[in-house]
Amino acid sequence: MSTVHQPDLKDRPARLAVGVVGAGRVGPALAASLQLAGHRPVAVSGVSDASRRRAGAMLPGVPLVSPAEVLQRADLVLLTVPDDALPGLVAGLAETGAVRPGQLLVHTSGRYGTRVLDPALRAGALPLALHPAMTFTGTPVDVQRLAGCSFGVTAPGELRLAAEALVVEMGGEPEWISEENRPLYHAALALGANHLVTLVAQSMELLRTAGVTAPDRMLGPLLGAALDNALRSGDAALTGPVARGDAGTVAAHVTELRRHAPQTVASYLAMARATADRALAHGLLKPELAEDLLGVLADGDDGPSGTDGIDGTEGNDR
């Protein structure tokens, strides 16, 4: 089937009519970046008032139409809907005959490769999975952030050049991800980016409780340096009381968190255990200090605990 589609791709004009199905934060930004590269946004679909306003701001003058009409008008269709909605959307478009042979159908889900587009492939579409490894705001700043952004790309062999060209035109860098590795790839990004936001938000709340008037200004240089060190050095960048094996300090942290912000205890303990494991594995945490530290973290699940009288054997029961 792929050899039948290849001539369609070669005969395609250099500039494409672009449509967006799902005017969330991602789709309008990608369409706007393709517009800067000379392509022509022709249609967008959106359900909520917020998505319609976003489309109007990011893609002024582009008509808001139904998903089926987006596919009717566009050579390149961006399917930028939530992951769980994608399979049903693709199946529905294919079943209703909305998909046209030779049409480039691109989804931006990190979780899926091109297999989720199989119903559209059977209808003659050309499937691409282009996931920007970037967080989006739904504002024009997103277009600027795409410069140098990595894209997780999955594509059939004969479409690799087309996928690469589209990513480069959006200012990005293609990173090839196999179909079977897409869920792991996406989990890695979620672990780093999504959980980072949660950790930073919790830290800011705790600083406000401690009387800090500008927690963002305090955390900015610290977290910026920590991120830079981590990207450069990996586990060797670990610092702080867990990496040092300061069990007494960690116990004091847990006590204070239980008193002032009990909702943060579980995440503190989980991240402290993960940090201790990595510090121990990389020789940063001395084994003789790890025993007491892990005992504190085990006791932390059951309630406030000091360091006196800790049974070190509990440290391995995690």
Image (cartoon, rainbow, N blue to C red):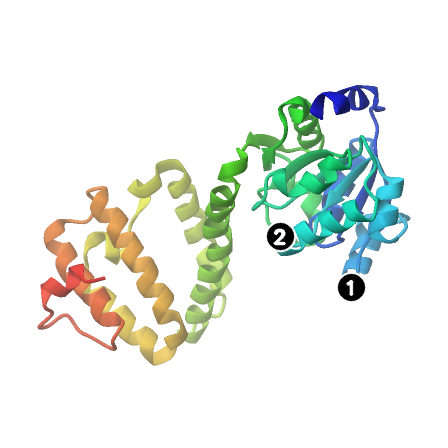
At a point 62% along the width and 55% down the height, the residue shown is 84
The quadrant of the rendering that contains the N terminus is top right
Q: Nearer the viewer, mark 2 or mark 1?
A: 2
The percent position of residue 251, horizontal first and vertical second, equals 22, 69
Earlier residue among tags 2 and 1: 1
Of residues 77 and 251, which is closer to you in this image? 77
Above or below residue 10? Residue 156 is below
Relative side of 308 to 146, left or right: left
- Decide: marks 2, 1 in contact (CB < 8 A)? no
Of residues 270 and 99, which is closer to you in this image? 99
Question: How far is disc 2 from disc 1 in space, using C-alphas?
Answer: 17 Å
- Indicate which disc residue 127 carries: none
Which residue in the protein does label 2 denote? 83
User: Given the image, on which type of amino acid does mark 2 rest?
Assistant: Asp
Corner quadrant of residue 100: top right
Helix, strand or loop at label 1? It is loop
Which residue in the protein does label 1 denote? 48
The percent position of residue 109, horizontal first and vertical second, equals 62, 46
Above or below residue 12? Residue 209 is below
Corner quadrant of residue 40: top right
Helix, strand or loop at label 2? It is helix
The percent position of residue 212, horizontal first and vertical second, equals 44, 70
Q: Please tell me how crowded label 1 is: few (under 14), some (14-19), or many (20+) other residues with Cα within 10 Å.
A: few
The percent position of residue 101, horizontal first and vertical second, equals 82, 33
Q: Please tell me how crowded label 2 is: few (under 14), some (14-19), or many (20+) other residues with Cα within 10 Å.
A: few
The quadrant of the rendering that contains the C terminus is bottom left
User: Given the image, on which type of amino acid does mark 1 rest?
Assistant: Ser
